Image: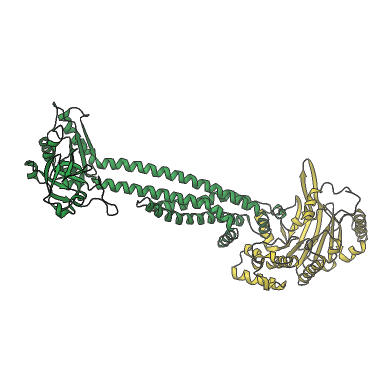
Chain colours: A yellow, B green
Amino acid sequence: MADEEKDTLHLNTSAEPEDDTPDEYAENHEEIAKLKAAQEAAAKANNTAGQVVYVPKEHIGELPLLELHDIYKIYKMGTEEVHANDGITINIYDGEFVAIVGKSGSGKSTLMNIIGALDVPTSGRYLINGQDTSSMSDDELAAIRNKKIGFIFQQYNLLPKDNLLDNVCLPLLYAGIPKQERKERAMRQLERVGLSEKWMQKPAQLSGGQQQRVSIARALAGDPELILADEPTGALDSKTSRQVLGFLKDINADGNTIVMITHDNSIALEAKRIVRISDGKVVYDGTAEDYAKLI
Amino acid sequence: MLNSFNLALRSIWSNKMRSFLTMLGIIIGVAAVIILVGIVNGEMSYMTESFASMGTNRITVNVVNLNSRSISVDEMYEFYEDNEKYFSNLSPTVTVSATVKVGNENSDATTVTGVSEDYLDIMDYDLERGRFIQYADISARQKVAVIGLYVAETYYGNAEQAIGERISVNGTKYEIVGVVERQTSESDEMSEGGSDDFLYIPYTAAVKLSRNGTINNYTFTVHDEYVEQASTVTTMIEDFLYTIFKNDDLYKVTAMSELLDSMNEMIGQMSLMLGGIAGISLLVAGVGVMNIMLVSVTERTREIGIRKALGAKKATILTQFVIEAAVTSSLGGIIGIIIGCIGTVIAGQMMSIDAKPSFGWIIASFTVSMGIGLVFGYMPARSAATLNPIDALRSD
């Protein structure tokens, strides 16, 4: 999780250019300027001044599944205040496949923690299915994570000592579902990712791609409203990456809402909608097609 | 709850070595408590038994007879008869340092005691053969003797053949009229100077053999209902003796049951002290549990992060770790109890005492070990439960 560590380490310096050598994780300022200009132009065309909330055409008139309203996350570093998220407003609708893209230090991980109910914003409101998480206690957040969100992590984060079935069962265990039903549901999800035959194996016996499929099965097991994938292909080679992305697209086609966090534009373009974060602000929010044209 | 229990068992099983080392402290602590207390209790009951076999109903009186103030056998018997509601038997005991000879063989270790006809009852002995010294023997100062089984078997072959034979005490011949039953326990050999190497003669005869010619020692037995009130009876004897001697340095009254009481008290203190030492070792074991649990929490930060991200509540994590600690230490406790019980029996056999594991201490040590697990497991468990899932996920 080196990039995430960088995230926090470089929060206060990310606005300044670091050095001249091109870096995959470093911010591309030209690109950002172009995206900002495009968004402003779009806003003007729509006759709305200032910041607009993007609503995909097919979801106009619907209530959003996730509603982030003017989210600020402010860290104190010594005497200096760092705005990791600086007034972010996004609406995400049921059935969408959204990629949140940002370079290292852009604040995308902070945003992911808030969307994933792992953290609460300093100010602003975050509603998930109409429920405001901003003032929830740790245990209430845990219940939200358990019932409404399925996590897919870059490092898979499977429990190494448990077998695949037990790993997939875990969110169901915490949801208090009886043992028999737990096993049946977990087995169905393992079947869905094609690993039901290996249910008694330990995660270490599988390849990275297979482990990520187990974690997809785990994310799906609780039947959550939202699948939150944090750099799901970050630890995989390009072939297995494509496979995992294919899986994500498939489950999206089945009606699951997916939010994927990534630093990689080419991965992000697999989604239907892209939100570009830079310096704690949304600089682009629109379709993947439009985004592809701009970069 | 049941889930936490399963998780705890699984986690203990998947870290066998670490769990075993954690348990080891508890195992040793609990086993030590049980073995130490078992041995002390065994020793205590052994000592109590051997004291009881000496007769808890016995009161011994030692006097120093001066020319001006003295008590005669007749006076003592008069006192005894006046208080027959307390006393069941009385015998003067005259210990004689005499040379016992059978034929040409010397038997130096044989103790020679002058006693009355009640002495057999006082000692609670039975006869193997023949008869005991009788009142007529005493009043007539008959030269008769009753011997221990060791003397009979060593010099005459068996008890039967000893009857009617003569034995020489300081050159005077005594006729053997009875042999006392074996007193040495079955498991031991009878030995020279042991509990079967003795010779009883009438005290009237013994007085003549002793140097000063007075009787200084008496043994009373009290009726069973007065054994508990031995101190009342001793006080009464003391009061009587004071009227004669006018000086409490000249006599000494000792009740066996009082000796037994003070010995029991001493042993009780010893067992409490040993229990305390063993308790400290249990406490040290508890610190070990805490240490391992803290390590376990640090080691499993990422696991805790995953669990919390997937919806485990604080209480769930807390329960998991507390139960893990409690299960580890109570498993250790159970193993410790088993080892302790076996160890107690083995130690008892080695020390040839009847050491039994005490049920009360088994319960106590199990409760303590379980409690240690809960108390010392709680702190690390709480720090696990309050971990921030974001930080926890980031740790390696």
Q: Quadrant of the N terminus of chain A?
A: bottom right
Examine the rendering and report whether any part of residue B115 can be seen: no
Examine the rendering and report whether any part of residue B192 can be seen: yes
Tell me where residue B105 sits by quadrant.
top left
Q: Quadrant of the C terminus of chain A?
A: bottom right
Measured as percent of width and height from the top left, residue A209 is found at 75, 67
Q: Residue at x 83, y 69 (%)?
A: A58
Foreground residue among B223 and B192? B192
Measured as percent of width and height from the top left, residue A118 is found at 71, 55
A248 lies left or right of B3: right
Measured as percent of width and height from the top left, residue B118 is found at 14, 45
Measured as percent of width and height from the top left, residue B213 is found at 13, 33
Foreground residue among B148 and B151? B151
Foreground residue among A31 and A239? A239
User: Vertically, is A119 above or below A55?
Assistant: above
Foreground residue among A29 and B255? B255
User: Vertically, is A13 above or below B211?
Assistant: below
Tell me where residue A153 sits by quadrant.
bottom right
Total numbered labels placed on residues in the image? 0
A188 lies left or right of B336: right
Tell me where residue A244 sits by quadrant.
bottom right
Q: Residue furthest front?
A: B104
A243 lies left or right of B192: right
